[in-house]
Image (spheres, helix red, strand yellow):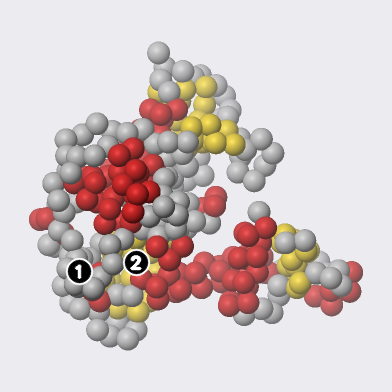
Amino acid sequence: MMIFEVKFGGTRHPVSSLAEASKLFRAWIDANDFGGSDLKKSDGWLYKIGGRTHFGYVSYNGRTWRGTYGEEGHEEIFDTVIQTIEPPTPPQIEAPKSATSKRTIADVIREGISTGLDNGAVLAEVKKHFPQSNTSAACVSYYRSKMKKSSPAKALKAPTKPATASKVELKTVDYLVKEWRQGFTAKVYVDGKLYSGVIDMGDDGDNSHFEFSNLEAYKTLNIAEIRELAADILAKREYDRLTKGKVCLMKDSKLYTVKGATVELVRKKNPTATIINGMTVAQFREVLAAVEAAQ
């Protein structure tokens, strides 16, 4: 019995459960190889069957929510991504690892999926090897989907030119999950030429899961440097949004903007606040970290 509808691609699709809505929405994203920046505001909206207004949404990572992000009443109403029953995925071509390289969370997830474990069993393996990990079912489902779509033939088409030049740039940078400012997607350019795509889940600090579309990039690019570049770009974008034609200030660990006033006037009226206008990107990143920590 169809009781909900999930909207994407300009069409509402009837589903029998929130789990099915999550599965259908993620399948559409994966089939089109969409990043977070490719989605429209209404993609993922949830409706009761035949309803005129949406009551919630499916986020990019497949989690389902009631209400609107940032508003009262916003809460998760389905906290796992449906586990798709599929035959075991064959092992994928991995970037060569040195004898001293550490086993990562991503390695554990890929190995578990390759041996036929379901999402729950894979999560158990991750927790066994990385007890402090914040890995979720959504992360496992993401890797399962990527491994399903990838094939050795496809991987071998990736550029093989080593990224030996010093000039590395990121373009089309965006948050992976916009509503939480979590993770990022980007295209990596070396010497002005596209070298690889990158997706960083942003789910476990320095140990967050990440993937390059070019297997050579695992050997030639430094993910820590890529993360710093992405963080600077995203922070600069947010800074420009908050300060263009406005004065932005941080008060009680929250950000506010004031239109039609000078920095001097805002500072005079808010002597204990921190004025954002005029900050460097590094300084503003510290402010964003403080705001997020207080939430």
**Badge 2: few (under 14), some or many (20 or more) residues near its Cα, within 10 Å?**
some
Q: Residue furthest left?
A: 153
Q: Tell me the mark number nearer the camera, choosing from 2 and 1.
A: 1
**Looking at numbered disc 1 in the image, what kind of residue is underneath it?**
Lys
Q: Position of residue 12 (x, y in %)?
A: 43, 29
Q: Residue furthest top?
A: 1
Q: Which mark is residue 187?
A: 2
Q: Residue at x 28, y 62 (%)?
A: 103
Instruction: Judge by depth and name the residue closer to the eye, 243 or 1.
Output: 1
Q: Residue at x 46, y 18 (%)?
A: 3
- Where is the N terminus found, in terms of image quarters? top left
- Where is the C terminus found, in terms of image quarters? bottom right
- Cα separation, mark 2 vs mark 1, equals 23 Å
Query: Tag 1's secondary structure?
Result: loop
Q: Which mark is residue 97?
A: 1
Q: Residue at x 19, y 73 (%)?
A: 98
